[in-house]
Amino acid sequence: MALSPRLEFRQAQSLTLTPQLMQSIRMLQLSHLELNEFVDAELLRNPLLEREDGSEPGDNESSEAPERSTEISAYEDTVDRGDRIQDADSIADGYDTAVDNVFPDQSAQDQLNPSSRLDRDGSSATGEAPDIDQFVASRPVLSDHLEAQANMLLRTTADRLIALHLIDGLNEAGYLVAEPSAIAEQLGAELADVEAVLEALQGCDPVGVFARTVPECLALQLRERDRLDPMMQALLGHLDMLAEHNMAGLMRAVGCDREDLNDMLAEIRLLDPRPGLAFDSGPVESVVPDVFVRKGPDGTWQIELNSETLPRVLVNRVYYATVTKKTRDPGEKAFLSDCLATANWLTKSLDQRAQTILKVAAEIVRQQDGFLTHGIAHLRPMTLKMVAETIEMHESTVSRVTSNKYLATPRGLFEMKYFFTTAIASSDGGSEHSAEAVRHRIRQLIEAETLADVLSDDTIAEMLQKEQGIDVARRTVAKYREGMNIPSSVIRRRQKKNLQATS
């Protein structure tokens, strides 16, 4: 059969993602802060959108406004008022006395500007309360604090420029993450000059900044206290043995007895391994729940969306109708039509987003009723697919809805992703166990152990199988234990021995 080009017509159905549909999908995974920023941007872009302030239509017309017989020009009223106001010197001359006798409690600036006076209750003369943010002291920033010290320590402009690049290379804890060689290459300076500036900056407050490792940070603080002797330097060189609580090996490596080691450890505990965290690195934002879960009078769970996190927008159709009647330009009419379509889409998308969050939260509460009633030991294994099939949605939609969303329950505030855990099979053929519940049980067993009975990972796996029928392997117990930052049984036994020896 010979191959030749030809034209064919075929009819097929396919789902096309329009830009608005893609934007609606992205809106599902936005947090309430990101959603409000997105809505604010749309309000600036679309003249037909406005925020709902909660007032009923017609409130402004029904309220009785004070009648004014004549309109007064704002300029004339301001000029007349300014002419009538006398300054402090003229008032004092009229009473033939000094200015301090007329205004004893006010500064000269307040006397010349009567509108800036504050009453005893804190309100201004105009009746408006002062902004409380103006009286809140701002916390110092680490970079500004160090830059001010560098300007006093360093004399040349070149050294100050190197110092600025070194300050930019610090992380939040105050450690230098930038390489001095890279800074020298970037500035075209000698590496010895960068090292000299770094050595000078390491004496800045807080002591310990510009260190590159934890031992160097502690050494800078000990040198400031004049306690960096050879024995302490040897101890800082074996911090890994200290982390493992290998006190016997640590005493042999340092060359000290038990009493000297306890004294040095007491001094190290007084140091700050992260000196930069004492400075403000940014505003701390509290987590606001998106959904409230409460116990109803009839014993069922009541689910309610947090109205404060939901932006309310309205479409001003009156303004649209008024403008479209007056305009004759086709371009302006097309612009208004696009704004109306975008406004309708936004209000509909916000409503669908709220309904989807409520539906997913309701299904999570239904499946995790045991956790809400009895605690973490009754947390059921749950996957995105289980929720998606129940509420008849796609699994990716449920994943987007549960991102950056929080549930306020009687058990505390939890992210929606917290309730989705893998399942661990039961040895007796019963219901499966949640991985989070297994972690909680492992933590309980380790917290209850004594020095004479430190549990190994194999022992914990056997106890879980005998007590609750949880079929879990030793390596799984080790993985969960390491994920909770719990050391091994050998290190825990050393910790308990050291604790018993020091007590």
Image (tube, helix red, strand yellow):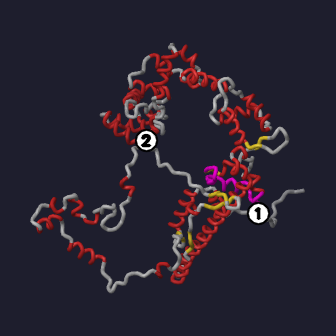
* Residue 332 sits above or below residue 391 on the image: below
| Residue occupying the far front of the picture | 297
Do the CB atoms of the residues marked 2 and 1 lie less than 8 Å apart? Answer: no
* Residue 350 sits above or below residue 461 on the image: below
| Residue occupying the far left of the picture | 96
Q: Residue at x 38, y 81 (%)?
A: 66
The span shown in magenta is: 390-412
Given the image, on which type of amino acid does mark 2 rest? Phe
Q: Mark 2, mark 1: which one is toward the viewer?
A: 2
| Residue 279: assigned label | 2
Q: Secondary structure at mark 1?
A: loop
Classify mark 1: residues with Cα within 10 Å, few (<14), some (14-19) or many (20+).
Answer: few
Quarter in which the C terminus is drawn: top right
Given the image, on which type of amino acid does mark 1 rest? Ser
Residue 205: x %, y % from top left? 38, 34
| Residue occupying the far bottom of the picture | 69
Q: Residue at x 43, y 33 (%)?
A: 209
Q: CA distance from mark 2 to mark 1?
A: 56 Å
- Residue sitting nearer the eye, 438 or 158: 438
Quarter in which the N terminus is drawn: bottom right
Residue 19: x %, y % from top left? 64, 63
Say left or right for 70 vs 112.
right
Taking the image as drawn, is residue 500 in sight?
Answer: yes
Residue 408 lies in the magenta-colored region: yes
Say left or right for 363 vs 218.
right
| Residue 14: assigned label | 1
